[in-house]
Amino acid sequence: MDYMANEDKIYLDYVKSDDPAEIDRGMRETVKGVRFSILTMGLGLARIKSEDSFKKLKFRSMSAYVNRFCEDTKMDRSSIYGWLGIGEAYIKYRSELETIGFSDSNGPSKLPYLERALTVSHKDEVFKNLMNMTQQDFIDFSKGETAGAASDAPYIINKGSVVYIKGKRAIIINKNLGKKTSNFLMKVVEAACKALEKGGYIMPVVLRNKKEVERFKKAYSRIMAEVRKG
C-alpha cells in the first residue's frame, strides 16, 4: 500500500516497505536523529500494529514490541504510543489529509484528536482548524470548548483558569500556584482585559497592606474626578 502519494509530505521511505524488519530498522534510525519525522514514525508503528507485523519480528504482542523498542532506543513509552496514535489517525483519514496537504509542519500531534473533533463540528471546519490551529487550541476545539468565532464572541470570556480575548485563548493561570495566588492573578488579568477592551492604559500601584488600600480607594475617587475634568 502506498501510504503517501506526495514524497514531499513525508521524507522517509521505510514506512512504505512490505518488510517489517525494514520498517523497524527505519524507525530506530529515525529516533537517532536521521531526518526525524513524527508522522513517519507514527505510520511505521501503525503498520507494525495493524498488520500484526510484531509477530514476524518475534514478539507476542504490540505492547511487547513497544517495550523492547523503548529499551533499545531509550525512548519514553508515552511518546511511542503518542506517535502510534498519530499514525493510526493518519491512516484512517488518509484521503482527507492528503487532500488538504497535511504534513509534519502542520502539527502531527493534533491528529489523535481529529476523530473526536469530527463528532462536535462539521467536517470542513474540522479539517480547516486542523491545518490552522495550534495543538492546544485544536484540543479545546475537539472538546467543544472553543470560545466561538472572534466576530460572534464577547470581547473577554473567562472559563475557570483560561481567559479568551476576541474568541482566542490568550492566558492560562496555572492552578498549581494555589487558590490565593491564582485568584490574585486572575483579577490582574481581568483588569488588564477591561483596559484593553476600552483602549485604556494601566498604571500599576503597589500597596503594602489593607490599610493603604482603603486610603488609596478614597484618594482614587477624588483624583480620578479631577483627572477627568480635563
Image (tube, helix red, strand yellow):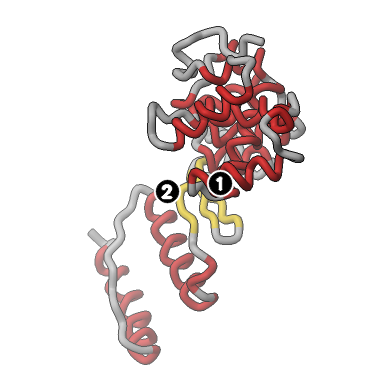
Give the total number of marks visible in the rendering: 2
* Precedes in sequence: disc 1 or disc 2: 1
Q: What element carries label 1?
A: helix
- Taking the spot 38% from the left edge, 55% from the top edge, the residue there is 195
Question: Residue placed farthest to the front in the image?
Answer: 58
Say above or below: 154 vs 171. Answer: above
- Taking the spot 76% from the left edge, 32% from the top edge, the residue there is 119
Residue type, mark 2 in image: Glu
Numbered badge on residue 197: 2
Where is residue 116? Give x, y as percent: 72, 36
- Taking the spot 50% from the left edge, 21% from the top edge, the residue there is 103
- Give the crowd class for mark 2: few <14, some 14-19, many >=20 residues within 10 Å: few
Q: Kindly identify which residue carries mark 1.
A: 70
Question: Residue placed farthest to the left in the image?
Answer: 230
User: What is the CA distance from the residue labelled 1 to the residue labelled 2?
Assistant: 50 Å
* Disc 1 to disc 2: CB gap under 8 Å: no
Residue type, mark 1 in image: Cys
Q: What element carries label 2?
A: helix
- Taking the spot 63% from the left edge, 38% from the top edge, the residue there is 141
Say above or below: 129 vs 70. Answer: above
Where is residue 9? Give x, y as percent: 48, 16
